[in-house]
Image (tube, helix red, strand yellow):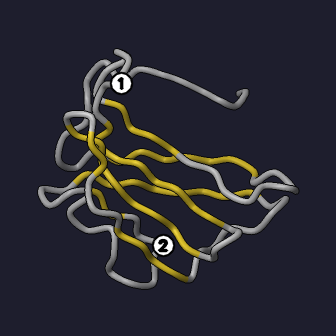
Amino acid sequence: MNVPHKTSLPEGIRVGTVLRIRGVVPDKAGRFYVNLLCSEEPGGEAALHFNPRLDESTVVFNTLERGAWGQEERGSGIPFQRGQPFDVLLIATEEGFKVPWRPQPRGDGV
């Protein structure tokens, strides 16, 4: 699968949905992101912006609603390394998305 990759989820996302994202961090990457978009329309909302930033040793979580970004939530201790594969689970809950590998309870409610 090539990057960037775009796919539709015809059944949508509801509480209990688990998305598994696998890939390899490019050797020279400073950061990468995964956006869960609510539509393919320009200016559409993002239910989740998941942005590991290797250059800052942090992961940023956010949402985009009505054209405005929400309040960023940040977590440290990211398990991503340049040139290495990764396997991330995003779990939809009533409060938002959970990312089970995270050592700190951040990203809740995003």
The amino acid marked with disc number 2 is Trp
**Labelled pair 2, 1 in contact (Cβ < 8 Å):** no
Residue 12, quarter of picture: top left
Give the distance between the C-alpha atoms of the residues marked 2 and 1, in whole angstroms: 24 Å
Name the residue tied to disc 1: 9
Which is more toward the observer, 76 or 2?
76
Residue 96, quarter of picture: bottom left
The amino acid marked with disc number 1 is Leu
Instruction: From the top left corner, tell me how far across and down residue 9 is, in percent.
Output: 36, 24
Given the current orientation, which residue lies at the most extreme front position? 68
Above or below, 45 relative to 98: above
Label 1: few (<14), some (14–19) or many (≥20) C-alpha neighbours in 10 Å: few
Above or below, 79 relative to 95: below
**Which residue is found at the position 75% from the left and 54% from the top?**
25
Q: In the image, 26: left or right of 14? A: right
**Which residue is found at the position 26% from the left and 51% from the top?**
92
Label 1 sits on a secondary structure element that is loop
Q: Quadrant of the C terminus?
A: bottom left
Given the current orientation, which residue lies at the most extreme left position? 94
Label 2 sits on a secondary structure element that is loop
**Which residue is found at the position 26% from the left and 23% from the top?**
11
Name the residue tied to disc 2: 101
Q: In the image, 72: left or right of 11? A: right
Instruction: From the top left corner, tell me how far across and down residue 22 is, in percent.
Output: 62, 48
Considering only order in the chain, which callout, 1 or 2, is on the residue closer to the N terminus? 1
Q: In the image, 33: left or right of 84? A: left
Residue 31, quarter of picture: bottom right
Instruction: From the top left corner, tell me how far across and down residue 1 is, in percent.
Output: 71, 27
Instruction: From the top left corner, tell me how far across and down residue 73 is, in percent.
Output: 35, 69
